[in-house]
Image (spheres, grey):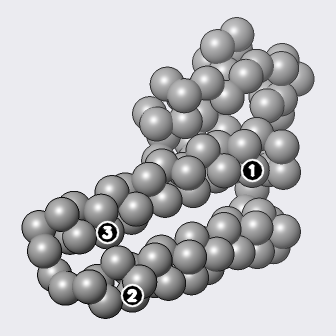
Amino acid sequence: MTCPHCNHGFALTWRRYLGSPTGKHQCPVCGGYSRFKMTLSYVAMVGSAWLVFFGIAFGLTVMILKGGRTPRAVAMVAAIYAAGCVIVAVLDRIFDERFRKLEKS
């Protein structure tokens, strides 16, 4: 990421990513606040990632629950959805870092 106030480049760490769910970041050098610019390509990539995840998760859910709703089957479905959310969060962080630019706020 590059600060729009002082042009200092800094990394989007997990701490910064998780600490700013709205996309507002503070430059470690000048202290200026900036936000990620929302772009159509970013929205399309994140939306596609969620659609792929839900499609795969729905298919696996149907296959797993076809044998009955045992506690083990329900736990497997919950694990699939939890793992999918983590994977999409990792992809979102990558998309933030590569495809979005900070703008002055």
Cα separation between marks 3 and 2 = 9 Å
Looking at the image, is 10 positioned above or below residue 20?
above
Of 36 and 79, nearer the camera is 79
Is 22 left, or right, of 31 in this rendering? Answer: left
Of pointers 3 and 2, the one earlier in the residue sequence: 2
Which labelled disc corresponds to residue 57? Answer: none
Mark 1 residue crowding within 10 angstroms, few (<14) / some (14–19) / many (20+) = some
Mark 3 residue crowding within 10 angstroms, few (<14) / some (14–19) / many (20+) = some
In the image, residue 67 lies at what x, y percent? 26, 85
Q: Amino acid at mark 2?
A: Val
Cα separation between marks 1 and 3 = 27 Å
The residue carrying mark 3 is: 77
The residue carrying mark 1 is: 95
Is 101 left, or right, of 75 in this rendering? Answer: right
Is 9 left, or right, of 37 in this rendering? Answer: right
Q: Amino acid at mark 1?
A: Phe
x 73%, y 22%: residue = 11
The quadrant where residue 39 appears: bottom right
The residue carrying mark 2 is: 62
Report if residue 96 is visible in the image.
Answer: no
- Count of residue discs: 3
In the image, residue 103 lies at what x, y percent? 77, 45
Q: Are marks 3 and 2 in contact (CB under 8 Å)?
A: no
